[in-house]
Image (tube, helix red, strand yellow):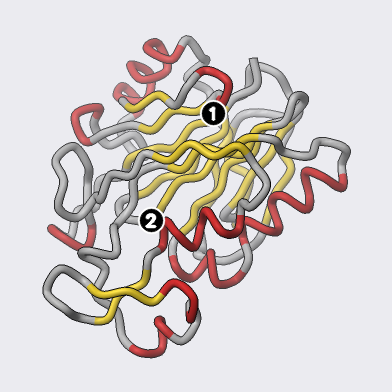
Amino acid sequence: MIRAPRRFGAAFSESADGDIQRDLSARASLSVALGVTSEWAVARQVHGARVAAVHRAGAAGDADALWTAARGLPLAVFTADCHGVVLKAATAVGVAHAGWRGIAAGVLEELRLEMTAAGHAPTTAAVGPGIGACCFEVGPEVVARFPSDASATSQGADSVDLAGAVVKRLSGLDIWASGRCTAHEAGSFSHRRTGATERMAAVGWLT
């Protein structure tokens, strides 16, 4: 488990923690380690920009970002190369599933806007592990969506710096980032590297 500094109220599971999406015993163990309930609010992720406000644990429908002002309610998104992002305000917390499609669609901006409009402007953000530009080989149609984040893999193929794209969209916030590449560094599930169906979790909560 990777814990962001305390003021960020966020944690990111690792492959050693198990398949947090489907293995409820692994989720319960992680919850104990975090000191939170194992009853989380989650969504059916669709790689878009829909944001859902939630007030209780359970399924929140189709969305790629959730937020709540309910203290003690953990929110989670599940990842295996996409970035999990946690936004924190003094009175609310939000989480976002940020793959290239969701980032391009504006999921981070939408989450920030909805929290702010409800009176909970985020001040901090924690960015979990995700595939690095070193390994994220993409076609020109993806590069075209991120003209200021174009990069190259370690093999010289076209790439996009997704972590950099996330940070740009969180401008003005106090940001902590894991910096780990899920595709080539140990400790993460990676769909791109192995076709993994297991998922890690990005968890945010308001204490």
Q: Quadrant of residue 194?
A: bottom left
- Which of the pair 53/163 is nearer the observer? 163
Mark number displayed over residue 40: 1
Q: Position of residue 128 (x, y in %)?
A: 40, 41
Dot 1, how many residues are within 10 Å of its Cα: few (below 14), some (14-19), or many (20+)? many
The three-letter amino acid code for the residue at tag 1 is Trp
Using residue 14 as the reference point, say whether residue 48 is left or right of it: right
The vertical placement of 207 against 47, above or below, is above
Front residue of 75/84: it is 84
Q: Nearer the viewer, residue 167 or 57?
A: 167
Disc 2/disc 1 C-alpha distance (Å): 20 Å
Q: Which mark is residue 144?
A: none
Horizontal arrangement in the rendering, residue 197 relative to residue 169 (left or right): left
Q: Residue at x 22, y 42 (%)?
A: 188
Marks 2,1: beta carbons within 8 A: no
Q: Secondary structure at mark 2?
A: loop
- Three-letter amino acid code of the residue under disc 2: Cys
The residue located at (29%, 64%) in the rendering is 133
Please say if 14 is above or below 61. above
Name the residue located 35 percent from the left edge and 89 percent from the top edge. Answer: 140
Left or right of 43 in this view: 171: right
Instruction: State the image coordinates of residue 61 (x, y, percent, origin top left).
Output: 62, 51
Q: Which mark identifies residue 82?
A: 2
Task: State the image coordinates of residue 84 (x, y, percent, origin top left).
Answer: 45, 46
Quarter of the picture holding the C terminus = top right
Q: Is residue 196 above or below residue 94?
A: below
Label 1 element class: loop
Quadrant of the rendering where the N terminus is positioned: top left
